[in-house]
Amino acid sequence: MRKSEPGSEKRHPHGRTWHRRWRHSLRLRLVTMFVLLALAMTAVFMGGMRGVFASGWREAAKPLIADYVDRLTAEIGSPPEVARAQALTQRLPLAVRIEGPAVNWESHPGSMRGRGFDSPASAFFSRTTADGHRVSFGLGTLPWQRGPHRIGWYTLVGLLLLILVAFFFVRRLLRPLDDIRDGAQRFGRGEFEKPIPIRRNDELGDLAQRINTMARDIHGMLDAKRALLLALSHELRSPLTRARLNAELLPATPEGQAERDALLRDLGEMRDLISDLLESERLASPHAALLREHVDLTALVHDVVADLPHADEVELDLSPDVPPMTLDRTRIRLLLRNLLDNAVRHGGLSAGASKPPLLSLRRVQGAVEIEVRDFGPGVDEAQLEHLSEPFFRTDSARQRATGGVGLGMYLCRLVTQAHGGSFLLRSANPGLSVLVRLSLS
């Protein structure tokens, strides 16, 4: 098999782009199918009619044409007179050629090729006069060839207009598919307020109606799940607070100190879990409210790092040209704390990394980028895309020693999206890099 030469894709980018667009567009393929079907039907019809007429009329026309050729030869005379031949070609769309001992003349000198003189049937249209001259007849200049070639252009324009009419008809016919595609994208983003418009009462309209019904059912189930989770989280807070207070009031005896500390630690983890659940449900709502204010990101980074238990294990690379931004201070603090806590726990020096985690803050093309990178073992590529999903953890055993329940990265993504930014996870080799991009506008 012959391989394509290097760079062939670069030499034909438009052809490949059009080919991909044609394969992707149902409208273009339908119009192409209609045009090819019309051409094929025309060719079959013309071929069939030609066969019918040819088989039926050929034998009937032969004696008539032979008699007509004899009359034309007699009209030219013997010996042939050039003046009569000229008058004949001016009156009829014929080409005449005379060959003989006295007269050698052509009505269309220099352009006799293709007029039938050299065809296998040329003997049928030739006659020999009594004085030895051979007179041959062929097609001359047809009436439509004398005037401007407008008929062909009119035909081409008509075909193009028919193709355009077919394209716009198919486009209008398949317009509900665009509505269904846009609606599916909105529903995938969690925007259920605007249903798919129903434009026609046909199969596509019925499909759009069924998708709207499905979206309403999914929206109702999500709302019910969110309401149940919020109610449970609120109801658990009060008994959890009382249990923690009672645990702190226990007498601190040397024998029970370890059990008391373990109980307080477990209660603290449960409190943090409930807080994270409540925060995630608030941020996941399409009507998440942010308390925006002017925030100095550089100062906020310093405050968050200073509150970390292992603040000395974090390196900072803060650009001085980062301006104040309008952000929700509490949510951005939560974002920074979770990112740094994850980097220190899984990629810090205490986890066996070669370097401490690095937090970079820089201004890039109308936006501010926050990047937290560690130098630990990193995350497998197959698990990387699931790392920001709720309750996902890379360790299958889910041991308590690893810390967390898998909501940290999920909350970071929700905070970023609530601020209209982008959240990107990628392997840094070694380690993991988390890039948060927040627009300045």
Image: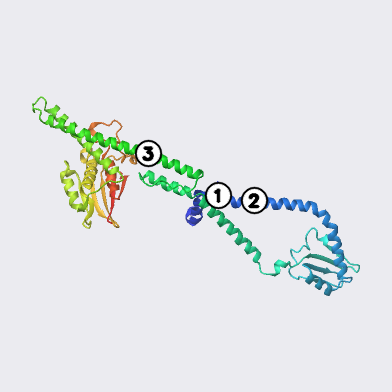
Judge by depth and name the residue closer to the eye, 439 or 131: 439
* Residue 152 appears in the picture as rendered: yes
Residue topped by disc 1? 30
Who's the residue at 61% across and 61% down the image?
156
Q: Position of residue 406 (x, y in %)?
A: 27, 37
Mark 1 residue crowding within 10 angstroms, few (<14) / some (14–19) / many (20+): some
Q: Amino acid at mark 2?
A: Ala
Check disc 1 and report its element: helix, strand or loop: helix
Residue topped by disc 2? 40
Left-right relation of 31 to 436: right
Check disc 2 and report its element: helix, strand or loop: helix
Rounded to the nearest whole Å, what is the CA distance between mark 2 and mark 1? 15 Å
Q: Amino acid at mark 1?
A: Leu
Q: Which mark is residue 138?
A: none
Check disc 3 and report its element: helix, strand or loop: helix
Residue topped by disc 3? 218
